Amino acid sequence: MNYKIIEWQNNRLRVLDQRLLPRETTYREFTDYHQVIDAIQALVIRGAPLIGLAGACGLALAAQQQTETNAEGFVDALYTAAEELRACRPTAIHLVWAIDRMLPSIEECAPKNGAERVKFLVAATNKLRDEQLAIDQAIGKAGAGLLASGDYILTHCNAGALATGGEGTALAAVKTAIAAGRRISMVICETRPMFQGARLTAWECEEAFIPYTLITDSMAAHFMKVGRINAVLVGADRIAANGDFANKIGTYALATLAKAHKIPFYVAAPCATVDLDAKTGMDIPIEEREGEEITLVMGRAMIAPERARVWNPAFDVTPASLVTAYVTERGIIAPKGVRHLFATDAKLKPHKLSPVDLRKKGQAQATPFNREAAATIQLIRRTAAEAAAKAGHLTPAKKAAQVAAGEAMERVLDRRRQKALKRLGAQEGEETKAAAAPSEAEAKKAAPKKGAEKPTPAKKKGAAPKKKAVAKKAPAKPATAKKAPVKKAPVKKAPVKKAPAAKKSAKKGKK
């Protein structure tokens, strides 16, 4: 690709704004890690590995703001930034992985002066980027063997260079197969609601001269049925220990369709995507995004009523039973083999201690954070604040970091609330009135209940009130009274009987 997706330039982070593709190629520059958080949440930066790389660069930006602080203050400030960056998108585990990879570098560069700290962290991020490129190439080489000449490969969302900053995962396999002389064509689902397939994957195919055909998400079943699809190849944002995985919403439907039509379903992802703490797919958090992504087309044209209720999960979970194989930098792996993916690296298994624990015990250079080992094994960690809180020895500095992270999330939620209030405007007043109306109705309903409770104490006073209650119940049999007039025959006979009675009275009068 002729475009650099992400790079460090003149003490700034420079990234390609993916929201504007393919209409224009615009770069954004960031000088503060809070800007990186906003960019990740706004999908300026997207794709699990690329989000992780951006998060690592965000720590380098945070270091630039702490050039004058001492070593301990520097570490505390960067741990705060790390917690905020980790929380900005919950589903993609690569963000947590990349931040964990940077923690020992933070400890190592803390004694240096301000400028040296930044250089050290920038070098660490560059190493992450180079490792990701090597991982992408290894995935491409492994995945290419699954693709035959003449195949039409269906893909969903974007799993190319725009998602990793290197060669991509799913698209890397296609590129490698084409480079080997095989005729491969891509079939790209548009990927509602943000059209990552139509906008990003199609654009990448254009740049790489890969033949492709664009379809709507709802057309996939038809083309599978008529035999136009030979395999499905997608990426992943998080893989659970049992082989379940989370990816862009709509992936589960494609996996189900592929199983029904006996089409192989492959998932291309780095080993760092595996979350051993997530036992099954049920343990993977699913991000819920704003409804505007559905009611507005790319934030502009409205296609639904303004007050339409919207469900907008960004991801769904596909069970391992629907996956044919995982394509990783370590080769082709069966879904059941994910749990044992790192069995050969038993000596390099992560410690149970958190980064905070390791720092407290002077073990910051322990094996789970060894940068060479991290290139080959998965280093999954729960957040440092959670682990330290469970251990019961959260330091004052880390408490402050945890509070700051919470406040950062509150700021994000505040901005969303304010945005929603502005959008609603006068409608909010109408909704509050409408909400108040049922409360008044409930108050009215509650009033007779209170009135009905008043005779209850009267019943307890003596037998007399109880008799009144029985007297009230007697006329309260409207059912029998109403049923009597329904029998019209007896009513008509009554006046017939009165006639002889009248005659007898007349005879008595004559006598």
Image: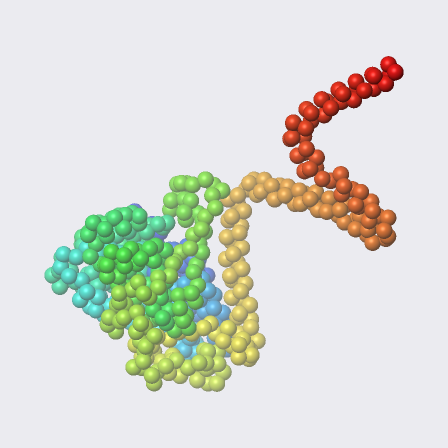
Residue closer to the observer: 408 or 232:
232
Q: Residue 141: horizontal and vertical position, in percent?
A: 20, 68
Identify the image quadrant of residue 502: top right
| 56 sits to left or right of 222 | right
Q: Residue 371: horizontal and vertical position, in percent?
A: 34, 78
Check the picture and name the quadrant holding the N terminus.
Answer: bottom left
Q: Residue shown at 80%/48% (left/top)? A: 455
Q: Residue 373: horizontal and vertical position, in percent?
A: 32, 80
Check the picture and name the quadrant holding the C terminus.
Answer: top right
Q: Residue shown at 15%/61% (left/top)? A: 148
User: Could you tell me if residue 46 is visible in this image?
Assistant: no
Q: Residue 22: horizontal and vertical position, in percent?
A: 29, 49
Asked if residue 253 is positioned above or below residue 76 in the image, the reply reads above
Asked if residue 132 is positioned above or below residue 462 in the image, the reply reads below
Identify the image quadrant of residue 355: bottom left
Residue closer to the observer: 196 or 156:
156
Identify the image quadrant of residue 4: bottom left
